[in-house]
Image (cartoon, grey):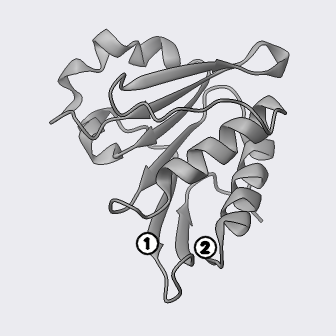
Amino acid sequence: MELILTDLAATEALAARLARQARPGDTLLLDGPLGAGKSALARAFLRAAAGDPALEVPSPTFTLVQSYDLPGGTTAHHYDLYRLSGPGGLGELGWDEAREGIVIVEWPDRLGALAPADALRVTLAPGEAEEERVARLEGWEGRLA
């Protein structure tokens, strides 16, 4: 599925839609170049999932992972793997435990063989206009009609 996201509001609307579909054990892999909107989509997803539009969602670029308690007892984990060269350090970052909740991963190529086969991959790319993004969604078969 390919979508044209005309502006940040469209990216946030997509994130809210994905948050409504997400359930414990799900992984979202956010792929794309620097500036493609991965962090904006992750931030909007977490705010929608938490039901808190003012939720503070700092980038985990330096901490590598940030965790959020969501309604219903679920936890979401936001990973930014840009600074990793591969999956070697994921065990120290609680990867296995995180998979019980909802996981969002920026720079998923660093996961290597640990990338879940049943994940939703969202590939973002700059569009023609300044704020426009192109989003390609693959995965979650039957859930994203």
Residue 63, quarter of picture:
top left
* 127 over 26 or under it: above or below: below
Q: How many marks?
A: 2
Q: Which mark is residue 125?
A: 1
- Residue 34 in the image: x percent, y percent? 33, 59
Residue 100, quarter of picture:
top right
On screen, residue 91 versus residue 136, left or right, reads: left
Q: Dot 1, how many residues are within 10 Å of its Cα: few (below 14), some (14-19), or many (20+)? A: many
On screen, residue 76 versus residue 121, left or right, reads: right
Foreground pick, 58 / 107: 58
Foreground pick, 136 / 130: 130
- Element at badge 1? strand
Residue 88, quarter of picture:
top left
Q: CA distance from mark 2 to mark 1?
A: 14 Å
Question: In the rendered image, is residue 109 in sight?
Answer: yes
- Element at badge 2? loop
* 51 over 100 or under it: above or below: below
Residue under the point 65% across and 29% down: 56
- Residue 120 in the image: x percent, y percent? 55, 50
What's under tag 2, amino acid-wise? Met
Q: Which residue is mark 2?
A: 1
* 48 over 37 or under it: above or below: above
Q: If the image is split into quadrants, where does the N terminus sit?
A: bottom right
What's under tag 1, amino acid-wise? Ala
Residue under the point 53% across and 70% down: 136
Foreground pick, 85 / 138: 85
Residue under the point 80% across and 39% down: 53
Foreground pick, 144 / 13: 13
Q: Earlier in the sequence, mark 2 or mark 1?
A: 2
